[in-house]
Image: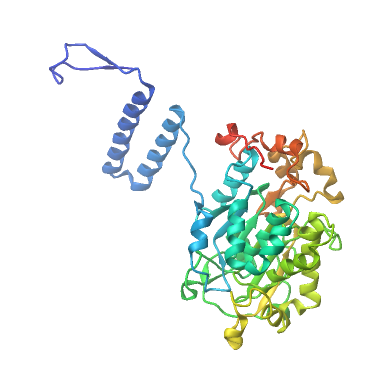
Amino acid sequence: MKIFADSENFSFLPSGKMITLKNRSVQGAVLLGTLIFLTISLYSLGQGRAAGESALDHYKEHFSKSLGTKSKEKEAKRLYAEELLQRPLATDLTSIPKLFHQSWINSTLPAKFEEWSHSCRQANPDWEWVLWTDEDNMKLVEKYAPWFASTYEALHSEIYRADTARNIYMHVFGGVYADLDTECVGPYEEMFAEYNTSMIAHNMPPSQSESLDKSGQRKSLQPTKALEEPRPKSTATGLEIPASAEGERKVFLGRMGTDDNFVHSIPNAWMGSTPGHPFWVLPLESCEQSIGSDAQPEYLTGPPALYDRVRDYRDEYEQGRGDKMDDHYNKSGWRHLYPPSRDQEKLPPQSLVVLPFWEVYPYSWERDGEAYRSLCWVTQDTFSASTCKQVMGLDHWGSHSITYWSHSWSTDGHWGEHMDALNKPTETSGGDENDDGDTQAKPEG
């Protein structure tokens, strides 16, 4: 790039002398400065602040690309597990904290997991993101579930422990947990608003929490009787969705597929909860009672085990509508953490919502999703996340996330073949490969 200088204005240069800028970054900086000056001039001439700012943003984006740099989208703030473990427990038991939990053996994620994790943090930018490691999980159990520690340590491998730890995240802190093969395509706050559930920053006092109306706007809390009202309908599909009242302690799980009797139809790959919900003691107690069995991870700590606990909650504990669930919790190892007996009359009601399949599990790995397996199952050579989302019609359904079912675990560790697939980067929403794709995670153990 050459700039002609006028010797009358720059007396230290001979007439006609050229300044040569060979450094690409300097070239860009000079051009960007010039364009910023023109933009400010446009604003000062009365063209309007909006036009000036729009042009400035355009120039910034253009020159950041020409200089080989990438502008970073705003995303959820990283919150380290050790920081969260030092925070006081939440006091609002009817709002879901903006905490997004994920877990892995260590802090180095396979390329695809890194990319999809970023998609969730970008879809929920005002949240906090916690990546729990195996070491963090042990500290969590020691601090908040010491009554379960001996069972936790006796589990056969880390996959069993990772399965049980996510129940503890939900009970102790609340928020949302998602497996790392989950890609987010929309903000979860929108989804929870449809189910009359408010969201707040973690540990915000109840007085600062307000519920949301259908459009996501804040409004005053007005208790409703969900079971006595007509079934609400999804704003995206017009189909009926489970009724959910305001001002309740709530658990959210997702349905996979269309067969409600399939024992894998309520996976533990995605969970949402208000803090202190008593349901979460049931999976841990079941694990404690079955620890001596030869059950595979799914049936001891995984989806079939969760499916059975949901049925127990519905049948034995009357969907939480009576006192049975709180009475049971009050005799459990967690009775001192969120004690129901502190004020029975003011304790909010509770419920459990199983979301329809399109919300978080639009792709089913069972036979009802077989037609899409070659595109949507990440272990397949023909896997394509972008094509999968198109053929599954995520925009039509108004889905908020999709799980690609990596099945990265085995009874004793991780499957090498599946890990090889996960270490290869895939396309992002913009069509570029992930920046962190060069870093390949090596499973431990």
**Residue 111 picture quarter:** top right
The percent coordinates of residue 198 (x first, y second) are 56, 68
The percent coordinates of residue 177 (x first, y second) are 63, 57
Quadrant of the frame with the C terminus? top right
Q: Judge left or right: residue 180 versus residue 41.
A: right
Q: How many marks?
A: 0
Q: Judge left or right: residue 204 versus residue 301.
A: left
Q: Judge left or right: residue 263 versus residue 134.
A: right
The percent coordinates of residue 122 (x first, y second) are 54, 49
The percent coordinates of residue 27 (x first, y second) are 35, 23
Q: Is residue 122 above or below residue 206?
A: above
Q: Is residue 169 above or below residue 30?
A: below
**Viewer-nearest residue: 147 or 233:** 147
**Residue 431 picture quarter:** top right
Q: Is residue 265 visible?
A: no
Picture residue at 75% right of the left edge, 76% below the top: 319
Q: Judge left or right: residue 122 versus residue 372.
A: left
**Viewer-nearest residue: 249 or 48:** 249
Q: Is residue 159 visible?
A: yes
The type of colouring in the image is: rainbow
Picture residue at 70% right of the left edge, 51% below the top: 158
Quadrant of the frame with the N terminus? top left
**Residue 255 picture quarter:** bottom right
Residue furthest bottom in the image? 345
Picture residue at 30% right of the left edge, 43% below the top: 43
Q: Is residue 349 above or below residue 260?
A: below
**Viewer-nearest residue: 84 or 310:** 84
